Structures are given as structure tokens and as C-alpha cells.
Image (cartoon, helix red, strand yellow):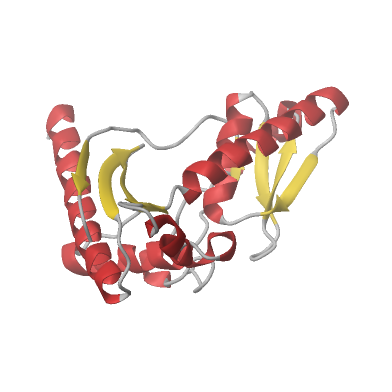
Amino acid sequence: MSESNASSAMIKRLEEEGEVGADYLEDLLDIVDLGGDIDIDIDHGRASIAVVAAEAGDERDLADLVGRDGEVLEAVQELTRLAVQTRTGNRSRLMLDINGYRAARRAELAKVAQEAVRKVQLTGEPVSLSSMNPFERKVCHDVVAAAGLVSESEGAEPHRHVVVMPAEDGADDAEANEVEDGAAGSRAGGDAGGAAGADDADGRSGSAGADAGGSGGAERDGA
């Protein structure tokens, strides 16, 4: 298969994931009697779905599907992935955002990671960040890699966290970037539903991003 055909096949598969995931979320919103619009996209080689407020009051109601520290959002994302896997037969790495929580959290985490990078550059000493879920750690790894430093995840869930180090500290161990969060299954409230599998490569990071991206979009109104 040529590269262009492979790319077209991947985009078609991701579009199907988005449609199936959106169908599942529409049904879920109907069941819990919540309103919202559903936007479908492809972002960094993944199907991406965002549930956003459609009218006044929706934002407050949708907050219940985010939960404290995004715990409910993580569970809904895993359930959506399971629904996609059941329909398509393929493991899904679909990303779900509700009420703009992930977008806001990504910006917040980028600032945290950038501050850690500055500290490491000034002191030459490793800096440990607070405990984070796989999505949050991935954001930090990407920021650190873009700055030319090295990061790795240490500890066991739910206390797994990112350590930012000078590049020379981690250069000899760069091949250790093999650990994938969630490969042994995920847990409800954090990474709910083990069958969907891993979220992001989360061992050692020394280069920016692992996902080739495409972008295409669609929008589903009403739910």
C-alpha cells in the first residue's frame, strides 16, 4: 500500500471512530438528560471529540461529566473508547474533551512544565512534578522535549509523576522510552475500563511527540 493510500485509510478509520464515539455520547447525553454539541476532529493521529455547551446552562450541567480533577471525564472517555472498539473491532485511542476541561488543563500544565524546565536549566538539578494522569504527563513530556531536556515518569498509579532532568542526565537511557501507561488496563475514576488499553507512551521522553497528525473536522449539533 502506498503512503498516500495508507494515510487515507488511517483518516477514514479515525473518522469512523469519531462518528461511532459521537453516536455513543449522543445516547449518553440523552440518558442523563444533558444538552450539548458534539464536535468531531482528527488531532495528532487520533480521533478527537469535544462536547461543548450548546446553550445557557449546559456548561454548568456538563461539569458533572468532568468531575473532580477530570475523573469522570477520564471514565467517560474510556467508556467511549470501549464503545468504539466494540463497534469497529479496533482498539481506540480516541481523545475526549468535555466543557473545554482538557484544553484549559493543557495550557495550565504547559506553564507548570515550562517553569520546571527553567528551574532545571538554572540549577542543573532534576525537578519532580506532582502526581498526574497519563494525559497530563504526556503534555508535560512534550513541553520538556520541545525545550531540549529529558523527562521520565516515576512511581506507581495514582502517584505516578514526571521528573524533568538536564539532557545529559538522561541521554544514556533514552532507549527506556518503552513504558506505556495503561497497558495492563486502567481503573474507573482514573483510567476507567482496561480493555481500551494505553493512553500515551509514558516512559522517558527526549524528543517531541510521537503521534503524526492530521486535521479534519465535523460537527454534530444537539445530543
Whole-percent x and y of residue 97?
41, 51
Whole-percent x and y of residue 165?
75, 35
Write the residue at 23% across / 57% down: 22
Whole-percent x and y of residue 169?
76, 33
Q: Is residue 155 left or right of residue 135?
A: right
Quadrant location of the C terminus in the rendered image: bottom left
Write the residue at 58% across / 26% down: 146
Number of numbered discs on residues:
0
Relative height, residue 9 to residue 52 (above, below): above
Quadrant location of the N terminus in the rendered image: top left
Write the residue at 23% across / 51% down: 18
The residue closer to the viewer here, 19 or 123, is: 19
Write the residue at 28% across / 32% down: 214
Relative height, residue 83 to residue 204 (above, below): below
Q: Is residue 15 left or right of residue 133?
A: left
Whole-percent x and y of residue 12?
15, 43
Residue 85 appears in the figure:
no
Point out the residue furthest to the right here: 123
Point out the residue furthest to the front here: 56
Relative height, residue 120 to residue 182 (above, below): above
